[in-house]
């Protein structure tokens, strides 16, 4: 089993509890999932070790399942090649939408300096989760350098656009509002970059009024990764970083906001340097 960092940097657990799952029968599918030990870090104070994902899921349900940031068992780099790129994600969102039962209201070509977008698509939908909403999809290449969402986000990403090549057609902002009163319910921005030839870097920001992770969110360290760590940035934001087969996943959450990264072609130390420059405190707090 790959080595996992049990006590993340700058975190000293007060208690370690060993939990063993007792089960008479496990299906073949479950046996596949339980090939690794899973480590559950509860608010950075207690660490639990589980012999299966089933036991982990049960413990999360007993605690605060809506306040945990985690990733499932990772796929190999070869398997991940089939996952859609940021450009493909943007194309799908603009052409098909991301919610249920969407009806096209309008689509326009625009000027970024004047409109704040290059292309805009607006759809209404009766979504089973968000209800009756109007969703605006915006794209612009300049989002790779600066992402602005009125009254919510003003994110300077110039250093990232200089460090990497912005992916062509890989930048989008999605704003979902209540059809009744125009209240902003959900925002998703998705930005694609190319660190090196043949690699990818996806940066996502999400604001969701239906999901509150709390001000002291939990993070799960999964031993199926080559390395897992809760990293504290220079501006004092905790980020879950996990690496497997040359891939890196990052997640930082606070209340209704989440910043996520998926990258290939970056080292663990390069990722930490990027996280230190992302000004996450301003974005998340």
Image (spheres, helix red, strand yellow):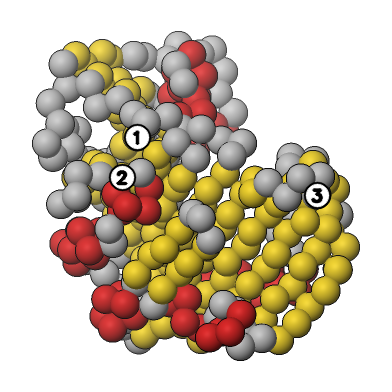
Q: Left or right of 165: which side holds 190?
A: right
Q: Which residue is mark 3?
A: 179
Q: Which residue is mark 1?
A: 219
Query: Tag on residue 191?
Result: none
Q: How many marks?
A: 3
Q: Count residues near mark 3 (Cα–Cα under 10 Å), then give few for <14, some for 14-19, many for 20+.
A: some
Q: Residue at x 32, y 23 (%)?
A: 42
Q: Does residue 34 appear anywhere in the picture? A: no
Q: Left or right of 17: which side holds 157?
A: right
* Pick the front one: 170 or 144: 144
Q: Check disc 2 and report its element: helix, strand or loop.
A: strand
Q: Residue at x 71, y 86 (%)?
A: 109
**Decide: marks 1, 2 in contact (CB < 8 A)?**
yes
Q: Check disc 1 and report its element: helix, strand or loop.
A: strand
The CA distance from mark 1 to mark 2 is: 7 Å
Res. 220 image quadrant = top left
Query: Tag on residue 240?
Result: 2
Viewer-nearest of discs 3 and 1: 3
């Amino acid at each position: 089993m790959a080595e996992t960092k049990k006590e993340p940097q700058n975190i000293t657990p007060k208690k370690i509890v060993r939990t063993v799952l007792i089960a008479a029968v496990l299906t073949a599918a479950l046996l596949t999932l339980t090939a690794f030990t899973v480590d559950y870090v509860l608010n950075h104070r207690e660490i639990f070790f589980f012999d299966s994902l089933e036991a982990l899921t049960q413990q999360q349900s007993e605690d605060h399942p809506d306040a945990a940031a985690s990733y499932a068992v990772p796929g190999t780099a070869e398997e991940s090649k089939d996952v859609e790129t940021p450009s493909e994600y943007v194309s799908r969102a603009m052409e098909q939408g991301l919610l249920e039962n969407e009806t096209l209201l309008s689509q326009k070509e625009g000027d970024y300096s004047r409109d704040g977008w290059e292309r805009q698509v607006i759809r209404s939908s009766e979504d089973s989760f968000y209800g009756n909403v109007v969703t605006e999809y915006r794209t612009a290449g300049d989002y790779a350098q600066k992402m602005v969402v009125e009254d919510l986000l003003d994110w300077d990403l110039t250093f990232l656009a200089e460090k990497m090549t912005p992916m062509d057609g890989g930048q989008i902002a999605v704003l979902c509002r209540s059809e009744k009163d125009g209240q902003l319910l959900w925002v998703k921005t998705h930005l694609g970059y190319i660190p090196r030839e043949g690699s990818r870097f996806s940066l996502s920001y999400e604001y969701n009024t239906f999901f509150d992770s709390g001000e002291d969110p939990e993070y799960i360290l999964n031993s199926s990764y080559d390395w897992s760590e809760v990293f504290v940035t220079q501006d004092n934001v905790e980020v879950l970083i996990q690496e497997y087969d040359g891939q890196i996943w990052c997640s930082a959450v606070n209340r209704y906001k989440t910043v996520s990264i998926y990258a290939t072609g970056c080292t663990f130390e390069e990722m930490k340097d990027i996280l230190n420059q992302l000004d996450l405190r301003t974005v998340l707090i």
